[in-house]
Amino acid sequence: MSHDKLMKMKHDFPPSKGVVRYDLYVSDTTVNYTGKSRPAMAINGSIPAPVLYFTEGDTAEVYVHNNMHMETSIHWHGLILPNRYDGVSYLTTAPVKPGETHLYRFPIVQSGTYWYHSHTMLQEQSGMYGAIVIHKKDAPVQKEHTLLLSDWTNDKPYEVDRRLHIASDWFAIRKNSVQSYGEAAKAGHFKTKLTNEWKRMLAMDVSDVYYDQVLANGKKADEQPQYKAGDKVRLRIVNGSSSTYFWLNYAGGKMTVVANDGMDVEPVEVDRLIIGVAETYDIVVTIPEDMKYEFLATSEDRTRSTSLFLGSGMEMPAKHLPRLKYFEGMKMMNDMMKMNGEMNDMDMQMSNQQMDMNTVMYPELSEEKHDMGDMKGMKMSSSEDMVTLNYGMLRSPVKTNLPAGPEKILHFNLTGNMNRYVWSINNKTVSESDKILIKKGENVKIILYNGTMMRHPMHLHGHFFRVLNGQGDYSPLKNTLDIMPMETDTLEFAATESGDWFFHCHILYHMMSGMGRIFSYENSPANPEIPNPDKSIKKIYADDRQIHPSAKIGLESNGSDGELIFSNTRYRLQTEWRIGLTPENGYESESHLGRYIGKMQWLFPYIGWDFRYRKMQAPEKNLFGQINTKNYRSAFHAGVEYTLPMLVIADASVDTDGRLRFQLSREDVPLTKRLRFNFMANTDKEYMAGFRYIVTKYFSFSTHYDSDMGFGAGVTLNY
């Protein structure tokens, strides 16, 4: 369907072929995917939610009944529909309060494979997602199967989000992807690791979260034995995960891609493809013989996989993907990163997934060259024996030109800070930026650059955009674009709607951290779902302003120490304490409140309060010659922290007594997969060095020597 026809049908509200009603009951439930019973959220008692079937021309009437004790919402991903039914709580649609029922009524003006999910907080991660299949009018019946891929964590989603923001590497430990100095030396990449930390980067990561399971239609494996030799099956594949990309490959031979994000494309045969978070693909596969063929979906970090088996008989396994080569990826990342934290794209002018920088990490392509100067080695489809889909191969079967109109050009630079897990556009989160005003009749062009080391699936609500991929008039229409590191992609869409529409990264934890923008049509009529827009927008802004707490308490043979931190995108409130067992050891507490400055947030000016007591035998003199004669001292102070190469924190401060202090410190230098080294030294002639061995995400063994308290060993509790 052309872009013009799709928009026209929506506003004409075509004669209904019939009203199709669904009642969706949202409730709390319990699931067991890994041998542990965990809380979840289900729709009509199932995860995933039921597949909703429509035919182009229908009118959808969906009643959402909220049986939970918290509010919820449903977003109809990829559907062209009136703004008030888009389903983003407080932006387009009123939230469904506990015990309430909300009616979504809209015309079905398109066909294809889409999906629906909660757009409230982190509910999507708990199981609130389902597929939508819309058949064309009078389309012939064909063999088809809907496959919804998802990820599952036994942790509470809030705990996942919090742990990402406090820079814990527990997920890397679980995935066995820690890149410690010991492992670097063993792999012959000790210098690579040094360079990585010299440029103030944490370890190479491919996906943020460790997942306990990935699922095919809510199962570890989905089986469809009814297919026979010669059958051609249209697989309607939805990536309904919260943050997992999937590699797809098939034991029965080539896969023919016939649609993407619900829109038809000219058929293209491939051996494999990667499906981004929130994307959909329609793929036709053939059952060669009367056997059981595996359609394999492997998480991008290759820690998990799930399968769909087609046919019956002897099992024919697909080729499983080997582990990633992380240190090769780290070396590539080192070459790409400048000392100021910005990316150096070396004028490669990459776009539309046609060059995959991550191929250096793929063992299955190890026979190819991966030099930075060898572009052939980075192309997604460079191997003659293996064709990998990229966006440049997608071609619409009909022209998709936008109608004539004035053009509005926007430049979006995707920005991020992995160290503190801040995700933004043009270094501003949703709450830090104004709505982007557009006018009906304009053509909006977005020039999108990914300046981070992670890929981002960028989704536009309520519109399809053209991806300018070299296919000219036949550029494909999409609603979600996977943009890889250092790529520049160009999107354009016709402004044909009214109201406010969200544009955001569809990795759930990136969206909640602020990577998005709101498009707002000028002179739009009032939305009856949002009676108080000023109050409602504050609810939207609250997502990326969330405060993330963390705590550490050490219980050791010579005393106790610890810290409590409350932080968000820009601010941090921190209290540290140390308690000795004797008056000579003393006790002290130091608190800071400050704001991170700059895109990489290496600079942190702060104010604070310092409280100390120690029974002194003689006056103390610091390295600046200043003397402290007090057993008890309480003073305000101001200072600044700066992150140096090797991730060492330099801290300079002055207090209201006029005492100066300069300190160097670092926590959690990774020596092995679980062993960490810490150190501190300052001009008050205080110093500390110690080790911590991580046992669980909350518990560690620790030992250290402190200049004031001596040697101590014990345990550390982490939250």
Image (cartoon, helix red, strand yellow):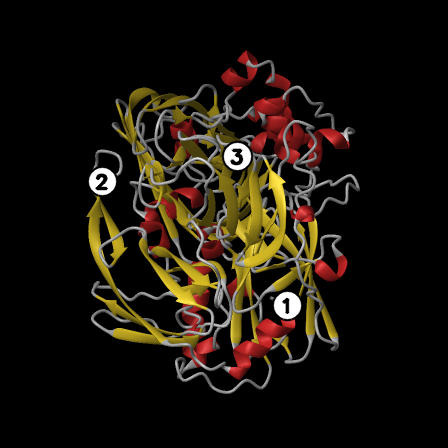
Three-letter residue code for mark 2: Asn
- Disc 1 to disc 2, how far (Cα)? 44 Å
Please say if the residues under marks 2 and 3 sit with CB atoms less than 8 Å apart: no
Of badges 1 and 3, the one in the foreground is: 1
Q: Is residue 549 visible?
A: yes
Which is closer to the viewer, label 1 or label 2? 1
- Disc 3: CA contacts within 10 A as few (<14), some (14-19) or many (>=20): some
Instruction: Left or right? Give the position of 681 relative to 5.
Output: left
Task: Quadrant for residue 314, please give it.
Answer: top left
Number of the label disc, if any, that sits on residue 205: 3
What amino acid type should be assigned to the residue bearing mark 3? Asp
Q: Position of residue 495 (x, y in %)?
A: 63, 75
Q: Earlier in the sequence, mark 1 or mark 3?
A: 1
Residue at image mark 2: 32
Label 1 neighbour load within 10 Å: few <14, some 14-19, many 20+ = some
Whole-percent x and y of residue 9? 55, 77
Point 64% across, 43% down: residue? 390
